[in-house]
Structures are given as structure tokens and as C-alpha cells.
């Protein structure tokens, strides 16, 4: 991993080059600095990698002032969680109140102390880090440590829209651990939890691309999102996942499918269109999961 990637990024926005230099020089020892000299550039840079962890924003700029920049940042889902500190000569109480009202996290009036600027920047960076950690935890299933249903719901909607725009196939795998209730009843819930963790790890290790997502759908069910993947390729991945779980060799004396833990998988693929939906794709995958179970379990079925 690039060590530089761990260093927080601060975007400094001001139409006066001297002001940018003062703040950039004061912060460069602790942060990576990006700069913009007007509101339009600020909005563009805020949405380009590396994404800023904090924006230092002048208020009085030509064409688009800092208030309007902040308002647009907070309206955009991609940038709305980036903290904004206004740095301005507008020191009236109503100016400060207005800035906080449109979403600013702090307000520094000129002339300022660089010691105070550093302290306030450090504080906002730390608060964002904590908020990001909490947000990440809210997307993770506590037992299996894979993404949870909430995260799946967010990602499938995003990938559906992206696949629709690009007119690329989107595949979903619905996965169920065979006879898991009987496993819990026979071996105990502690063993059941251990098995869920092992299966989740096997599934996660079986998908290679960063865009692929393995999530816990609920109970003993998991789901996999495979962007830009057609039906045949999705089946190949599903078979690989089925084999990985089988290779865990988790003893299951109460299963009719095999004397070890197995999974059944339903596969569905669609190129999103005007008359199709996420719900339709999931229903297709669920129907194929049922077909795999009806066919004897420990198998993969693809929607025709």
C-alpha cells in the first residue's frame, strides 16, 4: 500500500494565490495539499482522487462564492460528508451563522493564528476519521465481518444504475447453506456461528475483483454482486465458490446433500433496461436458488 495514501488530504480554495500559499505551507507538514482558485475548480477537485478529507474554503470569490460552493458540496452525495472550514474576512455574526446553516463545520475569521488553524484542521480531520470508521462498521455484519444487507442494498442500486448507463450485464448469486438449521440443532449455535464465519471467508476469498461484493443477506444466506459479468461467467464463479465451501470439509452428519457442509446457489444475469429492475434480478436469482435446492442441493442453477 502507498504510505502516502494514509496521509489526509486537505483542499485549499481561495482566489488569492498568496492566501493559498500561506495555508498550504502551514499544513503541508501533516497533510497532502490540493488547491483550487475558484468555485468551479473546487467542485471538480473535490470529486477527483485523491478525495479531500477536509476543505478550507474562502467565502469571497468571483463568479461562485464560497457559500454556493459549500451548498453544492452538501447537495452532492459524493462530497456531502467532507467537512468544510470557511476561512474569511467576513466576521459578522450573521455571516458565521449563515455559514453553519448551509453545512460548514467550522468558521475561521481573518486575520487568523496559524496555530489555531492547525488545531482546528486537526480536530475536523479526527472527527471525520471517527465518522468514517462508524460508517464502515455500520456496513459490516458483526458475526461474519463481510458487508451486511444494508451495504448490499446500497451497492446493488449503484451497480444497477452504472450497468444501465454502460449497458453491461450485472449478475447476482443467491447462496444458501444447505440444511443449516439442522446443523445448528445438532452441533449447537456456537458451532453454527463458526461455520458461518468460515463460509463467509471462503466466499470472500473466491471473488477477485474490487468491484465484486460478497454480503450476508440474512441468516444462513449470502449474496454476491458481479458487475460486468454475464451468466456463463457468473456460473463459473458460482461453481468455484461452491467448491471452496465444500473444500472446508465442515462435518455435517444431518445433511442429505453430503456428509459435510455445502451450499446451493441461484444465478441470474441481466443487462438493465427500461422494463427491468433490481427486484426482478433478485427474484430471478432467488427462483434459481430454489431450483438448486429442489434439485438436491450442493449445486448451481442459472436463470435461462
Image (cartoon, rainbow, N blue to C red):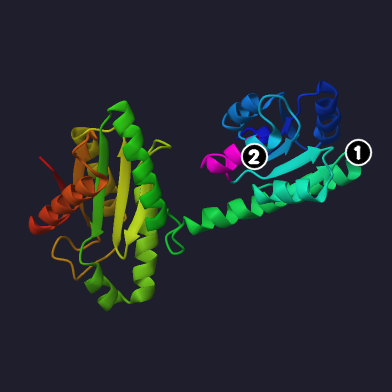
Count of marks overlaid on the render? 2
- Quick check: 151 left or right of 289? right
Residue pictured at 61% horizontal, 40% vertical: 71
Which stretch is magenta?
Answer: 69-80
Residue 96 versus residue 40 in the image, above or below: below
Residue pictured at 74% horizontal, 43% vertical: 85
Residue that carries the numbered disc 1 in the rendered image:
111
Name the foreground residue: 244 vs 37.
Answer: 37
Point out the image quarter for the C terminus: top left
Q: Are marks 2 and 1 in contact (CB under 8 Å)?
A: no
- Quick check: 32 left or right of 278? right
Query: Does 79 appear in magenta?
Result: yes
Report which quarter residue 208 is drawn in: top left
Residue pictured at 36% horizontal, 71% vertical: 191
Report which quarter residue 13 is drawn in: top right
Percent from the top left, x then y, of residue 101?
67, 51
Q: CA distance from mark 2 to mark 1?
A: 21 Å
Q: Secondary structure at mark 1?
A: loop
Q: Secondary structure at mark 2?
A: helix
Query: Does the image show residue 105?
Result: no
For label 2, the crowd category at 10 Å Cα-Cα, with few meaning under 14, some 14 to 19 and many 20 or more, is: many
Amino acid at each position: 500500500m502507498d504510505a502516502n495514501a494514509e496521509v489526509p488530504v486537505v483542499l485549499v480554495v481561495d482566489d488569492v494565490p498568496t492566501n493559498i500559499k500561506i495555508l498550504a505551507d502551514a499544513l503541508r507538514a501533516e497533510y497532502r495539499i490540493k488547491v483550487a482558485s475558484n468555485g468551479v475548480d473546487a467542485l471538480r477537485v473535490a470529486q477527483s482522487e485523491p478525495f479531500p478529507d477536509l476543505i478550507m474554503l474562502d467565502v469571497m470569490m468571483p463568479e461562485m462564492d464560497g457559500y454556493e460552493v459549500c451548498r453544492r458540496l452538501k447537495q452532492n452525495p459524493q462530497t456531502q460528508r467532507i467537512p468544510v472550514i470557511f476561512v474569511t474576512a467576513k466576521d459578522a455574526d450573521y455571516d458565521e451563522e449563515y455559514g453553519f446553516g448551509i453545512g460548514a463545520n467550522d468558521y475561521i475569521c481573518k486575520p487568523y493564528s496559524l496555530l489555531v488553524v492547525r488545531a482546528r484542521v486537526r480536530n475536523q480531520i479526527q472527527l471525520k476519521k471517527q465518522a468514517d470508521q462508524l460508517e464502515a462498521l455500520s456496513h459490516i455484519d458483526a458475526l461474519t465481518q463481510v458487508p451486511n444487507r444494508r451495504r448490499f442494498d446500497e451497492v446493488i442500486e449503484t451497480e444497477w444504475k452504472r450497468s444501465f448507463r454502460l449497458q453491461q450485464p450485472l449478475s447476482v448469486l443467491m447462496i444458501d447453506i444447505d440444511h443449516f438449521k439442522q446443523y445448528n440443532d445438532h452441533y449447537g449455535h456456537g458451532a453454527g456461528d463458526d461455520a458461518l464465519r468460515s463460509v463467509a471467508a471462503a466466499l470472500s476469498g473466491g471473488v477477485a475483483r474490487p468491484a465484486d461484493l460478497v454480503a450476508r443477506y440474512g441468516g444462513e444466506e449470502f449474496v454476491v454482486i458481479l458487475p460486468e459479468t454475464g451468466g456463463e461467467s457468473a456460473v463459473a464463479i458460482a461453481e468455484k465458490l461452491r467448491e471452496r465451501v465444500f473444500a472446508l470439509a465442515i462435518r455435517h452428519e444431518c445433511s442429505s446433500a453430503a456428509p459435510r457442509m455445502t451450499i446451493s446457489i441461484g444465478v441470474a444475469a441481466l443487462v438493465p433496461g427500461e422494463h427491468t429492475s433490481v427486484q426482478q434480478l433478485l427474484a430471478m436469482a432467488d427462483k434459481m436458488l430454489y431450483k438448486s435446492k429442489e434439485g438436491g442441493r450442493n449445486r448451481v442453477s442459472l436463470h435461462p
